[in-house]
Amino acid sequence: MAEFQSYTMNFGPQHPAAHGVLRLVLEMDGEVVVRADPHVGLLHRATEKLAESKPYNQSIGYMDRLDYVSMMANEHGYVAAIEKLLGIQPPVRARYIRVMFDEITRILNHLLWLGCHGLDVGAMTIFLYCFRERENLMDCYEAVSGTRMHATYYRPGGVYRDLPDSMPTHLARAERKGDRDAAMDEGRDGSLLDFIEHFTQRFPARVDEYETLLTDNRIWKQRTVGIAVVPPERAINLGFTGPMLRGSGVEWDLRKKQPYAAYANMDFDIPVGVNGDCYDRYLVRMEELRQSNRIIRQCVDWLRANPGPVMLDDYKLAPPRRAEMKEKMESLIHHFKLFTEGYCVPEGEAYAAVEHPKGEFGVYLVSDGANKPFRVKIRAPGFAHLAAMDEMVRGHMLADVVATIGTMDIVFGEIDR
Amino acid sequence: MPPRLESMAQALRARFSGALRPRDSSCGELSYDLNAADLVATATALRDEEEFAFESLIDVCGVDYLGYGQAQWRTEQATGTGFSRAMERGRAAAVSAAGDAPPEAASGISTRFAGIYHLLSLRHNLRIRLRAFARGENPPLLPSVTGVWQAADWFEREAFDLFGIVFEGHGDLRRILTDYGFIGHPFRKDFPLSGKVELRYDESRRRVAYEPVSIEPRTLVPRVIRDDHRYRPELRAEPSAALEEGEEA
């Protein structure tokens, strides 16, 4: 049999650990990676070009489909860029709602990351645990927007509508099927805020539960400690942001450093890693789960106490109330113009960034004064992270490549755009 | 402009008086134009010098300025003549392919393709944006900043793929987002939204066949630029003072 010195291996795009459609071309020396060349773009949909052909508001739905596990955080980046160009600020209640849903989104994202990362390196149970909690948060999405994932809830000038007074229950479905389980409707007898509060009370114990499965688990630590170490100066030079940067010990979080929405009024801590390996990034994200829970709790309290408008009262940007539309000619015209032509944004350019669960999600808008953007550039955090793949896995074993993909929290919707 | 930005703007003016030309920004961002020839030297200085310390390159993107500021629907004369049909069939393609590109300046600097660089200084908690117009148009050329920030690697590959901007000195300038064997640069403004080829499985030849697209490009909503008082700052009253009150709540 011939002796192989080094050989090239194709990993993905149809591989369960490739998180979607990553194709990795690996040059291997035995089981050691010599060079990794990720091929991306298999999910490229030209979101930016599509957005250039539509009025501003019609692209919000595309943003959900970028990073499809943290939908509202993407919307926030896009909407914030439009608001910056228009020179408007949403009402304060809308800003608190945005913060609350950004953090719900962060938990959604981190739970999916945790489940998949665990699954990738062989921990099956954690995946099922994570999806149990995700389901509750998806219901919150559904309660405010009508859809479980692609919400299109944030709009320039606020959010689409106020939080609902009642939470949908499983009752009707269960009665039809005759298997009503009271546990399924736990916490659903009040408003959406009651349900979210109920969730925040349960959630810290659930995070403890996840940690008992992994944090001191010998196999988990063998697979993550000392793997894909990135020193802080390299992390900065490679354009890392979010938990990838904080895992390397750099204290940087846009929510603290460049507060937007209502983050300036929130009390929370930023976890930072020490060694910059997969395990530290895991610890950082676990702590972020707890901190997000804290922020949600503060938002619930504030939102209970402070009713008010959630959308600007400007019919050039927001649709008029339906009742008005039935009676007033002006309102009807406003509605028609807004949904056909949209609004013109003053000439100029703006870059708005939010602390997305994966890092810095930025939207760069160039407007020439038209009702459609001239250029939209979406700065996806995962794109910069995946670009560092080669540097992170060089000299590691093949199995560590899987752990590295997991730790990067890769989602191809945002990388390929 | 907040004082922190103001002092950074001053420092930049003092250090790079000739190289960086400030641009108007309505949104309170630091934004500069610079010549492509100065890009690498300026970038290195911005990264290394203590008072700037832009250690992180957040984003690089290309922009194609073809057709900038052109509307498809003239609204000024509407009162006198009534509205025209905004987009006549076939005109969409004609408008974009008619070669209404801004003329290339005598200096060989493109007025069409530019690279936009977003830098972030973690130490000073500041961002700046640089814009460099490419040299030439066939192909547009820009120097690569991969030597300054490793992060530029994939961002430059993306700009090359989508706009055809060639980054000189980039070690591995391959296509990144489009398909293997793709022809053209899809984000250029003269590249149709529906693309140029479609593919189907050809039963008789027993393989995938590429053919010119069969759908006609169409515009559902015309591009409109309105310039009444809402969009002309000099005609605008105080900017939304009522909204600022919400701040304190």
Image: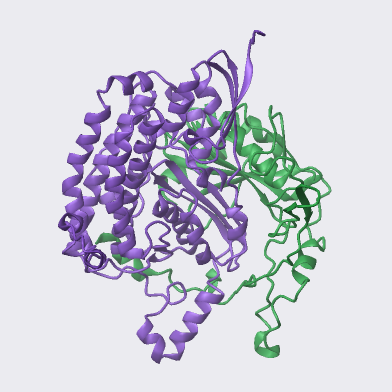
Compared with residue B10, is residue A171 higher up or lower down, i.e. above or below?
below
Compared with residue A331, is residue A246 higher up or lower down, i.e. above or below?
above
State the image coordinates of residue A320 (x, y, percent, origin top left).
Answer: 40, 79
Whether residue B80 sits left or right of residue B100 in the image: it is left
Colour scheme of this structure image? by chain
Q: Residue at x 67, y 8 (%)?
A: A2
Q: Residue at x 37, y 28 (%)?
A: A122
Count of all numbered marks drawn on residues in the image: 0
State the image coordinates of residue A156 (x, y, percent, origin top left).
Answer: 43, 64
**Residue A166 in view (yes/no):** yes
Q: Residue at x 58, y 61 (%)?
A: A373
Q: Who is closer to the viewer here, A156 or A187?
A: A187
State the image coordinates of residue A334 (x, y, percent, origin top left).
Answer: 48, 81
Q: Which chain is green?
A: B
Q: Who is closer to the viewer here, A210 or B54?
A: A210
Dividing the picture into quarters, in which one does residue A87 lie?
A: bottom left
Whether residue B218 sits left or right of residue B43 in the image: it is right
Question: Considering the image in quadrants, where does the N terminus of chain A appear?
Answer: top right
State the image coordinates of residue B245 (x, y, percent, origin top left).
Answer: 30, 66
Q: Residue furthest right?
A: B106
Whether residue B156 sits left or right of residue A285 in the image: it is right
Whether residue B200 sits left or right of residue A187 in the image: it is right
Compared with residue A409, is residue B22 higher up or lower down, i.e. above or below?
below
Q: Who is closer to the viewer here, B212 or A271?
A: B212
- The colour of chain A is purple
**Residue B18 in view (yes/no):** no
